[in-house]
Amino acid sequence: MYDYTIIGAGIIGSLIARELSKYDIKVCVLEKENDVANVQTRANSAIVHSGHDPKQGTLKAKLAVWGNELFEDLEKELSISLLRTGAYVCAHDQNEEKMLDDLYQNARLNNVKEMKLLDYKEALIEEPNLSPTITKVLSLPTTKVCFPWEVAFFALENAIKNGVELKRNAKVTDISKINDNYIIKINNQEELLTKNIINATGVYTDDIAKMVNKNIDFKITPRKGEYFVLDKSVKGFINHVLYPLPSKKGKGVLITPQVHGNILLGPTSEFTDNKDDISTSMNGLAYLKEHVSSLASNIPFQLVIRSFSGIRATSTYEDFYIKEDESNQGFYHVAGIDSPGITAAPAIAKYLVNDIIKLNLPEKTNYNPILQKKIVFKDLSDQEKKTKQKENPLYGRIICKCEDITEQEIIDAIKGPLGSQTIKGIKKRARAGSGLCQGGYCESLVLKIIARETNTPLNEINYDQLDTPILLKETKVK
Ligand SMILES: Cc1cc2nc3c(=O)[nH]c(=O)nc-3n(C[C@H](O)[C@H](O)[C@H](O)COP(=O)(O)OP(=O)(O)OC[C@H]3O[C@@H](n4cnc5c(N)ncnc54)[C@H](O)[C@@H]3O)c2cc1C
């Protein structure tokens, strides 16, 4: 019997697990995918927003501003990557300048710090590639960029080290009640008994809610966002996050520098009926190209190395829906977590545990909030590199030439409490395959290393989900 079962291991479930791991209680996380952070947390802009645009007084506004501050603690405790970019919201004419002034007032009421309004010439000093059609910008220095997969992995790994259990490939298919407890059915087979449930299933939060409450008062209306990724050789083209003015469609098509040097162009914003549709489209990408050009001149589209899309868990409630279910005590919904969900995630975890659940327990004496920093070989000094290679020759073998990832870093990504034995899992952890050739060179090498380290036949190594092998059979006779 678990005290708390969290359904969903995106950034929200992972940070809630870490928050609960402070206490002497039994916590389990159930994730339907073969890996953590594989849905919304996989595909987004990675911006830790300042909290400037959610309407004053909403939960989104409060938790975004607080979450932005808490990212500083996550950097200290979990050694996550954080790029302090700042942001410019750009106006193009008198009408938009008026909207920019209103946005400034809204941000001020939300308690966003250090903001400034700049004219075009002032903004150009730090961003020489800003479009000449821009007349005025709102500068938001507290805006940062993170690496959302890493935040989820590191938070959950820290939670596991503090006693939380994780089950992957564990899709919740039914929930029933027995006395004051819940029985969770996993994959229509195994059953798990728990006192409390936290529903952190992103785009599926309404489906999970309906398993216990047919009259739940929110519905997820999924909204797709498509992107282009520019190669990291573009680094420095733009240094701030560039936003257009927000509209009913959200924050608009942005230019966002990423922590590893790439730049993201996007996202679009289109409602869809399909919660799992992560395809990109000619129309979506054409819209993106047209709209992003209002922010910067001479965008180097020739450096596009990939396109992708993600689905926002937008809800009819129009704010974060973080509540105990009205008819089911001990059943908590963390729903409607679309943007700024990455930003707010650390604050959402604290708000849920302290203000909604009101878990009034003493912190356990052996709770350790610190996760040891992982070795990223290319970030070491020349002397440190030499020492590491002497200690371990696997640091001398580069597997991913685009991103300079060594064999030992691939092995580190395979092993450990939150290791992965899939090609995509290694890409998410060690970045092998994230560069210009998109895995064309290193994928076969990674495959062989996974097979060797896990003692698994090559044709049983999956790309991502279960039953997605890359190699099907031998085609050449030796
Ligand atoms: C295009 C786009 C751009 C965005 N940009 C930003 C940004 O720049 N900044 C920002 O702050 N926010 C941004 N967001 C929002 C942010 O990505 C989300 O708010 C955040 O990732 C939500 O995390 P989550 O854990 O709630 O959801 P998810 O990451 O989707 O996690 C939910 C998990 O639940 C699991 N699950 C679902 N059903 C079941 C089941 N039956 N059984 C077991 N497990 C289940 C899923 O597999 C998934 O892993 C963006 C979102 C999108 C789509």
Image (tube, rainbow, N blue to C red):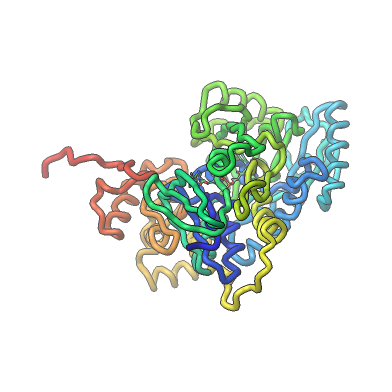
| Residue 474 relative to residue 12: left or right | left
Left or right: residue 450 versus residue 156 is left
Q: Nearer the viewer, residue 30 or 301?
A: 30
The quadrant of the picture showing ligand 1 is top right
| x and y, in percent, of residue 443 in the image | 35, 46
Which residue of the protein is positioned furthest toward the bottom in this rendering?
Answer: 365
Residue 425 on image: x %, y %: 42, 50
Nearest the camera: 317 or 141? 317
Q: Quadrant of residue 118?
A: top right
Q: Residue furthest front?
A: 179
Residue 68 higher or lower than 293, as above or below? below
Q: What is the x, y in percent for residue 212?
A: 56, 44
- Residue at the outermost left position: 478
Q: Residue at x 44, y 72 (%)?
A: 387
Q: Position of residue 362 (x, y in %)?
A: 65, 73
In this rendering, does residue 233 appear at all? no
Residue drawn at the location 87% of the way across and 36% of the way down: 102
Q: How many marks?
A: 0
Q: Residue at x 82, y 53 (%)?
A: 113
Q: Quadrant of the C terminus?
A: top left
Task: Give the side of residue 230 with respect to residue 75, left or right.
Answer: left
Tell me which residue sits at (63%, 30%) in the image. Answer: 269
Image quadrant of residue 439?
Answer: top left
Q: Nearer the viewer, residue 199 or 451?
A: 199
Residue 149 visible in rendering: yes
